Amino acid sequence: MPPFVADPQPPDPLPPSLDTGRGARNGPHPRRSLARKPPSAPPGSDPGSDEAVPAPPPAAVAPLESVQITADVPPAAADDQRRNTEQLLQSAENSLRRVTRSLSESERAMMQQAQSYASQARAAVHDGDLERAHNLAVKASLLANALAR
């Protein structure tokens, strides 16, 4: 393979319509100064003073109040849900009582979780949170039925 030989002639100049006048083809663009200005003094301060100006204290924030968002449920529907939740809880507790066999470690954990859900469901009924109570009762019932098989 023959050695590389550089072309001794310079490249053709750009047509006048494309020439930017900055030597775009033959060199880099002119550099801009990147020097930053020193920060200006805050209003009302003495520019000759070396003392730091303390920041104002943060504004006091009022504590948030506890707000519970609930659906507007008609009383008849609330009574139905309360009854349904109670039936689920009784069924779950009866199923858990019927489990008399020896349980594995994971089955014992399932039983404890079902009992915890049932306890939380009763507390939610007491607090008037019927939707949460129903959801917890369903979970307790599912776990209890799985253990009773």
Image: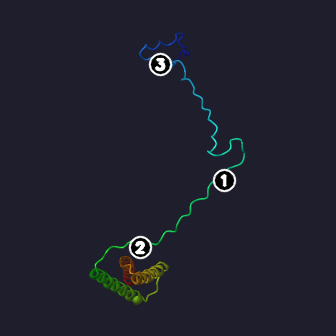
Q: Would you name the residue on which mark 2 appears? A: 68
Q: Earlier in the sequence, mark 2 or mark 1?
A: 1
Q: Distance between the residues labelled 3 and 1?
A: 53 Å
Q: Which amino acid does label 3 sit on?
A: Thr
Q: Which of marks 3 and 2 is nearer the N terminus?
A: 3
SS under mark 2: loop
Q: What residue type is labelled 1?
A: Pro
Answer few, some or many: residues within 10 Å of disc 3's Cα (few below 14, many 20 plus, some between 14 and 19).
Answer: few
Q: Distance between the residues labelled 3 and 2?
A: 68 Å
Q: Which residue is drawn at 52% across and 68% down?
A: 63
Residue 126, image x and y in percent? 41, 84
Residue 103, image x and y in percent? 46, 83
Answer few, some or many: residues within 10 Å of disc 2's Cα (few below 14, many 20 plus, some between 14 and 19).
Answer: few
Residue 123, image x and y in percent? 43, 83
Q: Earlier in the sequence, mark 3 or mark 1?
A: 3
On screen, residue 94 versus residue 43, left or right, reads left
Q: Would you name the residue on which mark 1 appears? A: 54
Res. 31 image quadrant: top right
